[in-house]
Image (cartoon, rainbow, N blue to C red):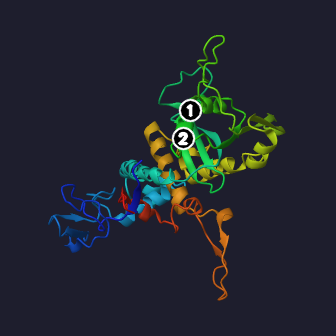
Amino acid sequence: MEKQQIATIGSFCLNEACVDYQKIDLGNVVKCGKTDKGVQRYRCKTCKKSFTETKGTMFYRCRHTEEEIAECMAMIGDRNSLAAIHRIKGIKEETVMKWLEKASTHVKQFERIVRKKKLSCVQLDALWTYVWHKEKKGRFEEDARGTFWIGKAIDMESRLRVACAIGKMEEEIAPELMKQVKMHAPDEGPPAMSSDGKGAYPKAMVETWGKVPEYGGRGAPPTLPKPGKDWQCLQVIKKRKGGKLESVRIKVIYGDPKEVKAKLGCHTAYIERTNLTSRTMNGRLVRKTLSFSKELRFLNASSILEDAIYNFTRPVKTLRVEVANPRGQARWQQRTPAMAAGLTDHVWTVGELLTAVLVPQPMNT
């Protein structure tokens, strides 16, 4: 996998024909005036080509300012509906929808940064939502409308969201979640995992990492993949009646029960808490609302943007660390999941998230 590094427009040349293309901070790119709208221009001294600071970002050739667009995307990340943004900012809903799709396409590149985190303990779960209408008895369920499930995987150590998939059933999204988790360490076995009582997750785990045993010479040759001896997986099975929790049972699927429980804990609290965070961040996921998604592609786009905002711009209170400061200043350093995972050293702004880009990292660094 090619290593990537975060950069800003103006720190490298964007001309693919240039010998210094995507080489950061060589001093070959200098400021070169501004456009009629006040957008900064840059010029590469190597290839003599010029470009604006919005080139390569979602702001390129947009009539509105970067501040307006970033503020609208931040409002979407704070559960505001398109109608609310229209009332507050005076920008058409259709325009904000176009920005949402552009923003999701832009921030999706940072999944490659997230995949640098090596996973040891992961929790998985899915939350219910719908597109256009809720599923009702006797109603024909369409492929792009009706009830959907959004599955997520979260790193227990840093609370980093490492996988997201949308589908009609958990049996459909479980293999996709496992596929994304495997991207963090393609050549290694699965991390320790905990989930709810759905059987789709252990099955998808075997389909993703399982191996067919070698033929021992007796009987029919094996054809089905089997779990590894060092795997660790448990399920938290909850029994409810009348909307109330009656009992909780811990079922160890793979591994030594004592070791698995000690490593993973007997809960799925982190993934359940991030599901609650999703409903408070994404207005499309609120259970009783008029801001639900009318099209599946906008649900996909809002989920991608939500995860990026959560990972890079939202400090999590339980991740803060105490700092020794004799001058009586801030006692705590706030940290985002990306900071806790060692992927960045500061809390990003939404504007920074929408302007930063990934470029290949030189082989000698």
> Compared to 286, does 49 lie above or below?
below
Q: Circle 1 sits in a helix, a strand or a loop, which is it? A: helix
Q: Is residue 325 above or below residue 144?
A: below
Query: In the displayed structure, would residue 239 be above or below residue 277?
Result: above
At label 2, the amino acid type is: Lys
Quarter holding the C terminus is bottom left
Contact, CB < 8 Å: mark 1 with mark 2? Answer: yes
Label whose residue precedes the other's in the sequence (1 or 2)? 2
Left/right of residue 258 with respect to residue 341 in the rendered view:
right
Kind of residue at disc 1:
Thr
On the rendered structure, is 140 left or right of 320?
left
Disc assigned to residue 182: 2
Outermost residue to the top: 219
Label 2: which secondary element: helix
In-front residue for pair 192/55: 192
Image quadrant in which you'd find residue 288? top right
Q: Is residue 22 above or below residue 112?
A: below
Kindly give the residue lying farthest to the bottom in the view shown.
327
The image shows residue 48 at horizontal and vertical percentages of 14, 66
Who's the residue at 64% across and 33% down the image?
201
Neighbour tally class for label 2: few under 14, some 14-19, many 20 plus, Cα within 10 Å: many
Q: Which residue is mark 1?
A: 208
